[in-house]
Amino acid sequence: MHQLNQHQQGIKLLTAIAINLIITVSQVIGGIISGSISLLSDALHNLSDVLALVLSWVATKLSLKQNTTGKTFGFKRAEMMAAFINAAALIVIAVYLIIEAVKRFLNPQIIESSWVIWLAGLSIVLNGISVWILHHDSKHSLNIKSAYIHLLTDMFTSIAVLLGGVLIKLYEIYWLDGLLTLLIAGYIIFSTWKILMESMRVLMMFTPSEVEIESIKNKICKLPDIANIHHVHAWQLTDHQIHFEAHIDFIKDLKLSEVENNLNKIRTILYRDYHIEHVTLQPEFDHCDHKDLVSQHA
């Protein structure tokens, strides 16, 4: 079922790629003819959408590949890498737009506003279709969500460009073109920062925010046969898979069946209270090693 969903996501991404190629080419031509930097900035944002969607599509295809002895986790992290690269690229683009907007704001130029209005309108319609296509899957995949945010922000920026084009046509306030570009860049940074941080946390193997290590320790150490839990590691392989491993100290030398019974109790706690399915536990008794909850030697 998961692979079927990812196959469907791939088809949706390809559709969105085709739509955004049309938008990008149209806006580049229109931006050059009209002299509007806000339209060109929207075109640049749309080009980043195309690259982001292609990256997301490739990551989705890679994540479907089977695990092998040489790649025991397969390409599960590909989607996380795509999300991080997409978000980082948007931040860089936003900074570039800010620099260009300041230049244009200080030196306004005459703009053919009719091109701006019509092409911004086209972008709103086509981006709206792309957003609708990816809306459902964005709730279940950080990779798709990063592409979805690209498209959603571009739809909003096109709305701003359209309104700016109308005001420029009516009142000839050409400095508004630079101001709109500044607002677009600020919105891009605001909407992208969280995805950048979330994907970085996964790639850096930080403990997931919903997993409280001290809380886990307290619950496990309440079991009558458990003396200590140490060398704990908790990380996310993807935005859905949480992995957990730890060494478990037993109070006395138990039979293997009794050890397994205790380990099953721990797995139940981890799954029931923290939704952790991938668990590796190392049972120990009278073993001399560092007993720190989080080891500095691992």
Image (spheres, rainbow, N blue to C red):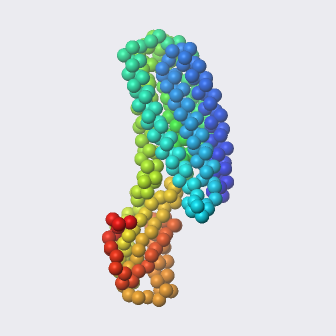
Q: Residue at x 51, y 43 (%)?
A: 146
Query: In the rendered view of the protein, which quadrant contains the N terminus?
Result: bottom right
Q: Note whether 185 is above or below 11 in the view shown.
A: above
Residue name at image x 61 percent, y 61 percent: 67
* Total numbered circles: 0
Can you say whether 181 is above or below 274 in the image?
above
Question: Outermost residue, front direction?
Answer: 70
Image position of 264 (left or right of 231) = right
Camera-side residue: 265 or 279? 279
In which quadrant of the rendered view does residue 218 lie?
A: bottom left
Residue at 64% from the left image edge and 32% from the top image edge? 19
Q: Residue at x 62, y 37 (%)?
A: 16
Q: Decide which of 137, 260 is in the foreground and name it.
A: 260
Q: Percent position (x, y) of residue 292?
A: 32, 70
Q: Position of residue 148 (x, y in %)?
A: 54, 41
Q: Is residue 23 above or below residue 65?
A: above
| Any part of residue 223 in sight | no
194 displayed left or right of 57: left
Q: Position of residue 259 (x, y in %)?
A: 46, 83
Whole-percent x, y for residue 191 in the image: 44, 39
Q: Quadrant of the C terminus?
A: bottom left
Q: Examine the rendering and report whether any part of residue 175 can be seen.
A: yes
